[in-house]
Amino acid sequence: MFTGIKKCFHRNRDYFKSRRARFQASVYHLRHQDPVETQIFAHRGSKSNRPENTLAAFAEAIRVGADGIELDVHLTKDGQLVVIHDESIDRTTNGTGLVRNLTFSEIRNYSAGAWFDKDYVTEKIPLLSEVLDLLIQMQFTGVLNVEIKTDKFQYIGIEKMTSDLLTSHHYPFSHIYCSFNLESLQHLSELEPGVDLCLLMSTSEQKIKLGLQTDYITHLHPRLDWLQKNSNHLKQLTKPLRPWTLNNDVDMYFAFNHHLAGFMTDYPALAVEIKKRYNTKK
């Protein structure tokens, strides 16, 4: 019985805490008249209602009006740039194995959408070039945020291959890079001087300081809980923030109220709606 009362207390506390945060956020935004330009990045596409990092997820993100798209790049055994988050295909396909140990044709044997819903059984892990073709086809003019996934495995040459592809044409959209791996970002700074390079981090204060001190790092991409913990010190930072991953209205209002450069979200449609509401003061 005591356990049940305790659970009820925590549920009620969290509920009222959430309501209070919503009220505070709405009051703050009504008091501040400047329109917000914070960019909304669809995290692995619209991954809340489509299988992540698939053409279906990216198409949905564009359809709902996301300012940016975030995706992850790995290198196959035969040197193909593929879009997938994990180092292995186990979680998001009906196959198994490390991306670096499989050829692209082997990876294409598996569905990248069946795990999510039977309606997406035909979705495959796409090449980065296929995603670029889709963005052109759908007339996307926002920002493509490419995460170089070298924090666990060092894919030799992945930075140059990615840069060569993204600079080989005049695309209607711009691109930026992010990574947990500072060496990859340094390499990209040499390949593409002037491109936005964003250091990913969770809650490490040391990494925050390193990002602030490193001249070629233009933006910091901290995890949401670091942002919440340091909310009173954001104005002291000398580089713009794009935190991950903001998935409810309270956190999105927080980002807009603080005029952050942008944020990653699994719910781009919700974020776009809140941004419109915010800028019309409703």
Image: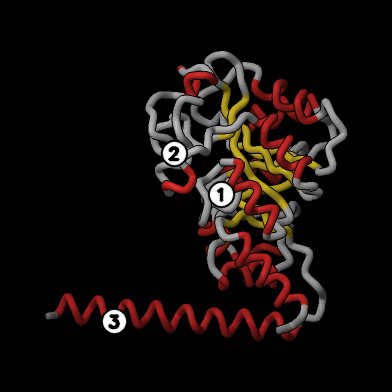
Residue wearing tag 1: 205
Residue under pointer 3:
9
Mark 2 or 3: in front is 2
**Rendered location of residue 114, percent (x, y):** 42, 42
Which residue is rendered at x = 70% and y = 77% of the image?
277
Mark 2, secondary structure of its residue = loop
Quarter-wise, where is residue 33 in the image? bottom right
- For this view, does 144 lie left or right of residue 25? right
User: Which secondary structure lies at badge 3?
Assistant: helix
For the residue pair 107 and 194, the one nearer the viewer reads as 107
* Residue 178 at x, y percent in the picture: 66, 39
CB atoms at circles 2 and 3 under 8 Å apart?
no
Name the spot of residue 251 as percent of width and height, x first.
57, 68
Q: Which dot marks residue 92?
A: 2
Residue under the image location 68 percent in, 82 percent down: 28
Q: Nearer the viewer, mark 2 or mark 1?
A: 2
Observer able to see residue 237:
no
Frontmost residue, 146 versus 66: 66
Image position of 205 with respect to 256: above or below: above
- Crowding around mark 2 (Cα neighbors within 10 Å: few <14, some 14 to 19, many 20+) is many
Give the Cα separation between the discs numbered 2 and 1: 32 Å
**Amino acid marked by disc 1:** Glu
